[in-house]
Image (cartoon, rainbow, N blue to C red):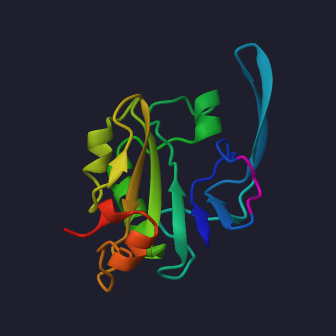
Amino acid sequence: MKILDPACGSKMFWFNKSEPHTTYTDIRKETFSLQDRGKLRKVVINPDKIADFTNLPFRDYEFNLIVFDPPHLKRAGENSWLAKKYGKLPKDVWPQMLSKGFKELWRVLALDGILLFKWSDNQIPFKDVLNLFDQQPILGDQRGHTRWFVFIKPNDNQTSEPSLLSESDLKERGLEQWRKK
């Protein structure tokens, strides 16, 4: 299993910030401390590789799972805590950037691979972002300001027909109700 986090930032939602299956990339590498709600907070952005998610240095079909949590802000002060911690989208070209980034992630995603996409709609609505992508998610959160969406890259060489046990195996296991109709 090969996993990519192409905008890892400080790896906030990772339980293991050095998860061995995962390649962490980000456009920046830095450590800083800032005041936040009366406390001095330290943020460490330390990716395995410096890379821009719109132009990745990886082969086609390389990753089985991509966890994409890009910056969600287009309005934040350059030195604000939010911009420093989460990053910031370019105000005028954010749609092109996200669209190009999604296409690039789709390129490095394996057939039958899964792309998890996290978005907060505090400044840009979900529908505006999802409309930038050539693919539709198969599932996702329906409520809240931060949502996760799941995309699967299709593999036209495989069918999605369910594989059922034979009639005799179903009967032997007491599962006759699962018989094909």
From the top left corner, tell me how far across and down residue 104 is, in percent: 43, 69
Q: Quadrant of the N terminus?
A: bottom right
Is 18 a magenta residue? yes
Residue at left offset 56%, top offset 77%: 58
Residue at left offset 29%, top offset 79%: 159
- Nearest the viewer among 76 and 104 is 104
Residue at left offset 32%, top offset 54%: 137
Residue positioned most to the top: 38
Taking the image as shown, residue 127 lies to the left or right of residue 45, namely left
Residue positioned most to the left: 181
Figure check: 170 above or below 149? below
Taking the image as shown, residue 89 lies to the left or right of residue 51, namely left
Which segment did they paint magenta?
Answer: 15-19
Dominant SS type (magenta): loop
Instruction: Give the quarter of the image for residue 62.
Output: bottom right
Figure check: 106 above or below 159? above
Could you tell me if residue 81 is visible in this image?
Answer: yes
Instruction: Give the quarter of the image for residue 21.
Output: bottom right
Figure check: 49 above or below 111? above
Instruction: Give the quarter of the image for residue 143.
Output: top left
Figure check: 137 above or below 134? above
- Nearest the viewer among 176 and 151 is 176
